[in-house]
């Protein structure tokens, strides 16, 4: 059986046991997983299929079939084990994926020939480590009235008093997701930074701010508002009392994303292809 493969730039991926993960609600993904398992075994690679509800700690590499949500969930889990993942897009945008189903054999051959790299992507943590995020942590008010007064401290110094629908704290990886829709900047994904973006602020002078990832962000709310909702990557959600302080900082874990060394997969090419970045409008 194949084990370690070294890339041309020195990164190493262990193919001793490849986990193929898919969302159990997606029948198309299930059939694709079976096809990929057959392809991997034909190349003498040990593989096992599982859903994203049944992660195994015994794999050495994760191949994820689905949209960005499925990839985010898998990346969060395997960050603690430093296991790299490769996304195969079955969703709409697939910003975190590197391949599509028709290209899977080409993707496998790229890995076997060392034409790949592994990028470490910083993550965020909150609630004393109970919440981790690769894209972003979002804080919003609970209840019908969406507007909340949120006080943001950085390293215990008050920075801003937001009257807004909420705030987003994002990694560079998440800067092309909810943060971008809320008017935030796009950051190159390997930058060591965080972005704070207000959601629909009720003042024109509330603007996004980019800060070093070593900073510690604390968020509190006014006393006359109901509970707050905090979510990680739009998936894990917790209720927070109005008297609680939410601390957000860089996680000790990093997500390891395997990127194929294909020109079309460069960050700037992906921006143009998937976000139509910099393309002039044609009437």
Image (tube, grey):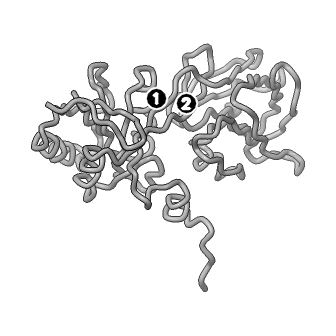
Q: Is residue 174 left or right of residue 34?
A: right
- Dividing the picture into quadrants, the one containing residue 282 is bottom right
How many labels sit on residues?
A: 2
Location of residue 20 in the rendering, given as x and y in whole percent from the top left corner? 25, 36
Residue toward you, 91 or 250 = 250
**Mark 1, secondary structure of its residue:** helix
Give the secondary structure at mark 2: strand
Left or right relative to 227: residue 282: left
| Residue at 59% in and 23% down | 251
Residue 250 horizontal/vertical position (percent):
63, 25
- Give the Cα separation between the discs numbered 2 and 1: 7 Å
Q: Position of residue 243 (x, y in %)?
A: 77, 15
What residue appears at the point 45 percent right and 37 percent down from the top-left corner?
72
Instruction: Please state if 178 lies on the left or on the right of 79 as rendered.
Output: right
Residues under numbered marks 2 and 1 in contact, where contact means CB atoms less than 8 Å apart: yes
What residue does disc 2 label? 133
**Image quarter of residue 57:** top left
Along the line of sight, the residue nearer the viewer: 238 or 36: 36
Residue 158, x across and y down, in percent: 88, 26
Pick whichever, 267 or 146, lies toward us.
267
Image height check: is 154 above or below 114? above
- On-image quarter of the C terminus: bottom right
Residue 228 in view (yes/no): yes
Q: Which residue is mark 1?
A: 76
Whether 213 is drawn above or below 68: the answer is above
């Amino acid at each position: 059986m194949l084990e370690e493969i070294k890339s041309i730039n020195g990164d190493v991926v262990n193919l001793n046991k490849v986990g193929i993960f898919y969302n159990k609600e997606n029948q198309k993904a299930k059939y694709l997983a079976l096809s990929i398992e057959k392809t991997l075994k034909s190349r003498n690679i040990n593989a096992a299929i599982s859903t994203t509800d049944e992660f195994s700690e015994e794999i050495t590499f994760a191949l994820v079939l689905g949209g960005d949500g499925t990839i985010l969930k898998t990346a969060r889990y395997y960050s603690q084990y430093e296991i790299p993942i490769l996304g195969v897009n079955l969703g709409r945008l697939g910003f975190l994926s590197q391949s599509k189903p028709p290209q899977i054999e080409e993707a496998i051959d790229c890995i076997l020939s060392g034409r790949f790299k592994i990028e470490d992507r910083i993550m965020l943590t909150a609630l004393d480590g109970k919440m981790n995020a690769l894209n972003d942590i979002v804080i919003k008010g609970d209840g019908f009235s969406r507007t909340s007064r949120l006080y943001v401290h950085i390293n215990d110094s008050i920075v801003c008093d937001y009257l807004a629908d909420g705030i987003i704290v994002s990694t560079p990886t998440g800067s092309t997701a909810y943060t971008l829709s809320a008017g935030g900047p796009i950051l190159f994904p390997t930058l060591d930074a965080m972005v704070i973006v207000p959601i629909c602020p009720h003042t024109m002078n509330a603007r996004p701010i980019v800060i070093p990832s070593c900073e510690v962000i604390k968020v509190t709310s006014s006393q006359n508002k109901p509970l707050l909702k905090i979510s990680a990557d739009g998936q894990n959600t917790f209720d927070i009392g109005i008297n609680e302080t939410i601390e957000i900082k860089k996680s000790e874990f990093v997500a390891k994303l395997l990127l194929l060394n294909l020109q079309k997969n460069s960050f700037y090419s992906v921006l143009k292809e998937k976000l139509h970045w910099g393309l002039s409008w044609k009437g």
